[in-house]
Structures are given as structure tokens and as C-alpha cells.
Amino acid sequence: MTALLTETSTALTAAAFVAGAGTVVRTFDHHTQDSGNVSWLVEADGERVFVKSAGPVEPLPDVPVPALDHAGRVALLENAVRLARSCDHPALATLRNVVATGSGPALVYDAAPGELVGVPRAQRSDPRSAYQRFGHLPAERMLAVLDTLIDVHVDLAELGWVACDLYDGCLIVAPDDRLTVVDLDTYHPGPFTNTVGRMFGSDRFMAPEERTLGAAIDQRTTVFTLGRLVTHFATRRSPGSPLRGPPPASRRSGPARRPCRPRRSCARPRSSAGSRGRGRGRAAPQRWPPPVAPPA
Ligand SMILES: Nc1ncnc2c1ncn2[C@@H]1O[C@H](COP(=O)(O)OP(=O)(O)OP(=O)(O)O)[C@@H](O)[C@H]1O
Ligand SMILES: [Mg+2]
């Protein structure tokens, strides 16, 4: 089995450790992320994993300085470990291992299948983008994905977690519509006070209190952001959105009807990170629809 899943500490940097433990198929660094973290999709021993690190200790030259220094980024990764170990909802990527490296923790997750719904602003009008293809799923399929998004947040809320920085860049959707919600590093273990003014987040989905110094951030904030996501994708009524237009078409007339999925419970924290089944009880996978013309 790959060292990514068996080792718990190494003197190597995360980058060197990953490079020696598998084949890096994609790197997420300052070219695509503004966090300062560096992550990799890695193939090792026939498996694909996602490894997330806090990146280099010193800021890179000629690159915008991230909002958080290395210690701050490590603290968020440690928070992400606590969250992952508290809840095993199937819409969360399974945390398989944590390796203490010479450059901070390396979190080894199962790689989520599918594509990130959030794309850079310049690509949001492109009918070939994952954003537009997800935004044009038929109503039943769209609502099933959004149901799962709400379901995982109900479980997280029962554990006390308050959403932060939740946006379409956290949603990975597979061809069979399986949702994985990623990058929950800034979720907060309980209500708190906004001490920074404009918090991390996308203006499209943020609640007013996330821009208000001294405001309370709590489950109402989570509900607001979930509502914005549902409005954005399921009604296509968000002002200025490239998805503006009629809501997703249902294949039936009348309100969309779909079978209810039994709720899972995350009431008992997991004792250790581990793999788990992710069956969703779905029929044969459907493919995402082919590219469509952008809405008028
Ligand atoms: N479990 C996963 N499996 C596959 N890909 C993933 C997984 N988690 C994240 N990704 C991909 O890696 C990218 C970077 O991950 P993530 O958003 O967690 O990093 P980040 O450094 O916190 O970025 P940001 O600057 O957006 O906060 C995501 O946008 C997504 O495309
Ligand atoms: Mg992040």
C-alpha cells in the first residue's frame, strides 16, 4: 500500500513526500488557488487520492501573499481533520490518513469523482463549462444533488459545524450526480462573532453578516448560503448570473417528484479516519447532458 496511506510522519516536505509516493496527475497551487495551500491529485497503487498541504512555509516571490501565513493555514487543516473525523456523511470526501511532514500536515483524502461546479468567472458563460452543464441538469437531478447538499449540512449542523466559505467551488459532481463537498477547512465548531468584516467567501452566496464586523455567524448564516446556492442553480434567478433564465426543466409536468433518501446520521464521531462505502442507491448512472447553448 502506498506510503501516503501507511506513513504517519516524515522529515520530507509534503511536496517531496508526495512526489516519492505516487504519480502526481494534477497540482493545485498558487496558479489556481489563493489560499497558499498546495494540493495534489495523486495516483498510487491503483488508487487516486487528493493530498492537501499548507504549502511552503515562506511566501513565494512574485506571488500575492496569501491571507493566512503558514501557521494559520496549518490551523485550518487541523480544523479540517476534526471536521472529517466528526462526520462520515457520504457527501464528504473520506479522510484516509494524515501525515506529519516537514512542512506541516498532509491530509490524504479519497479523490472525489467528477468535476468542480465552480469555474473561474470568465468561464461561467461557456456552455461547455461544468458550471453551465450542472446548471442545466433536469430539475429532478439538480434537486437530488441540492437535497444531498442540504442533507450533509443538516448532519454537520447537528454536530455544531457552522458553514464558512461555502460556494460552488466546493461542489464536485460526478457523472452519476454523486456530490462531494470539499474545502470545509474554515467551517466553525459553533456560532462565533465576525471579527474581520468581510470574511472569506464568494459574494454570490455570502450572508450579510459575513460582511459585518461584530455580527453573529451561526446556523442562520449556513441556511442563508444554502438558500443562495439553491436559488442560484435551481431557480436561475440570481441577479447578474450567467444562469439567468427559466428554471431547470422537469421531464414531468407539475412539481418534480423524487424518492426520499433515508437520512444518515453523523451523531457518533468516527474514532479514526477510514474508508467507507458510498452507495447512493441510484439506478444506472446517467451522463451529464451535452453542452447547451448559453441562456439568452
Ligand atoms: N477530495 C478531492 N478530490 C478531488 N479533487 C479535490 C478534492 N478536494 C478538492 N479538490 C480539488 O482541488 C481544488 C483545491 O482544493 P481546495 O479548494 O480544498 O484547496 P484550497 O487550497 O483550500 O483552495 P482555495 O484557495 O479555493 O480555498 C478544488 O478546487 C477541487 O478542484
Ligand atoms: Mg480553501
Image (cartoon, helix red, strand yellow):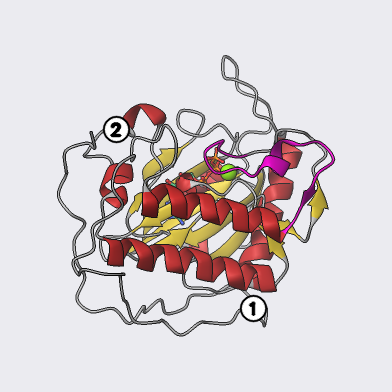
Cα separation, mark 1 vs mark 2, equals: 41 Å
Q: Position of residue 268 (x, y in %)?
A: 67, 82
Furthest-front residue in this view: 254
Residue 35 falls left or right of residue 211: left
Whether the magenta-drawn stretch holds residue 180 is answered as no
State the residue position of label 1: 270
Residue 56 can be seen in this image: yes
Tell me if the residue at label 1 has its CB under 8 Å from ligand 1. Answer: no
Q: Position of residue 228 (x, y in %)?
A: 52, 49
**Residue 125 - label:** 2
Contact, CB < 8 Å: mark 1 with mark 2? Answer: no
Q: Amino acid at mark 1?
A: Arg
- The segment highlighted magenta reads 201-218
Q: Residue at point 55% right, 38% down?
A: 202
Q: Position of residue 44 (x, y in %)?
A: 38, 58
Q: Residue at point 37% right, 64% down?
A: 143
Furthest-bottom residue in this view: 262
Q: Residue at point 24% right, 60% down?
A: 138
Q: Amino acid at mark 2?
A: Ser
Q: Residues within 10 Å of mark 1 (few under 14, many from 20)?
A: few
Residue 1 can be seen in this image: no
Q: Main secondary structure of the magenta part?
A: loop
**Residue 248 - label:** none
Instruction: Write down the quadrant of residue 120 in the picture.
Output: top left
For the N terminus, the quadrant is bottom left
Secondary structure beneath disc 1?
A: loop
Q: Is 44 situated above or below 122?
A: below
